[in-house]
Amino acid sequence: MALLVYFPAIYSEDYATNHAETLACLMLIALHLVQAFLSRSLETSLFRMRIFGNRWLVGAVALSFALLCAGSYIPGVNTFFGFVPLEAEDWGKIAAGATALVLYSEFIKFLLRRRRRWLLRKHVNPDRWRISWRLWRRHRPESFESMPSDANSEGAAHQ
């Protein structure tokens, strides 16, 4: 995502190099802040979870975003990091990137939930990808004598 805003900005005549670098860096940081909320669950949608349920996470993300803005707008700090203040259009690009990340993550979570439901209908444990006991009883071999056991194969190997 950061490269998708960096390369058009670096080759545009409207942007200076440090402006494009600032935009890409702040985009990357903002996407990581959004990813912190998205990573709370592998399959549960962000919109079904209580977003503000984890106060430490909300506080850490809010503080990180405040420091992100401070690093871009406070004169001594932005020269230290080599940042330039961003315009409203640039923040819109960052918001669009964050929205695209949320939509992509929600689509992947939707596919994972569908896969889990499909596996459960097939009597497969989706956490282990193993066949369930009920399905195994239906399709088990008729005699176990034809199957080599671990004890017999170990004893034959030691002789």
Image (cartoon, helix red, strand yellow):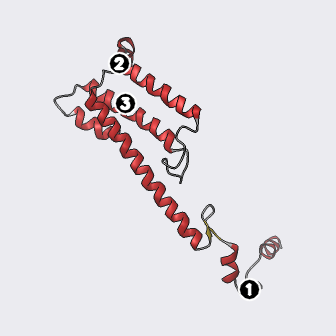
Residue 146 bears which disc, if any? Answer: 1
Where residue 38 appears, x then y in whole percent?
49, 44
| Mark 2 or mark 1, whichever is nearer to me | 2
Of tags 2 and 3, which is closer to the observer? 2
- Estimate the x, y position of residue 117 in percent, counting from the top left: 54, 66
The residue type indicated by label 3 comes to Cys
Residue that label 2 marks: 73
Dot 2: within a 10 Å radius of its alpha carbon, few (fewer than 14), some, or many (20 or more) residues?
some
Closer to the camera in the image, 27 or 87: 87
Q: Distance between the residues labelled 2 and 1?
A: 75 Å
Secondary-structure class at tag 2? helix
Helix, strand or loop under label 1:
loop
Residue at 45% x, 55% y is 108
Q: On the image, which quarter does residue 6 sit in?
A: top left
The amino acid type of the residue labelled 2 equals Tyr
How far, Cα to Cα, is label 3 from label 1?
63 Å
Are dots 2 and 1 in contact, CB under 8 Å? no
User: Which image quarter is the N terminus in?
Assistant: top left
Q: On the image, numbered disc 3 is attached to which residue?
A: 25
Q: Percent from the top left, x then y, of residue 31? A: 41, 38
Task: Please give left or right for residue 128 compared with residue 5 in the image.
Answer: right
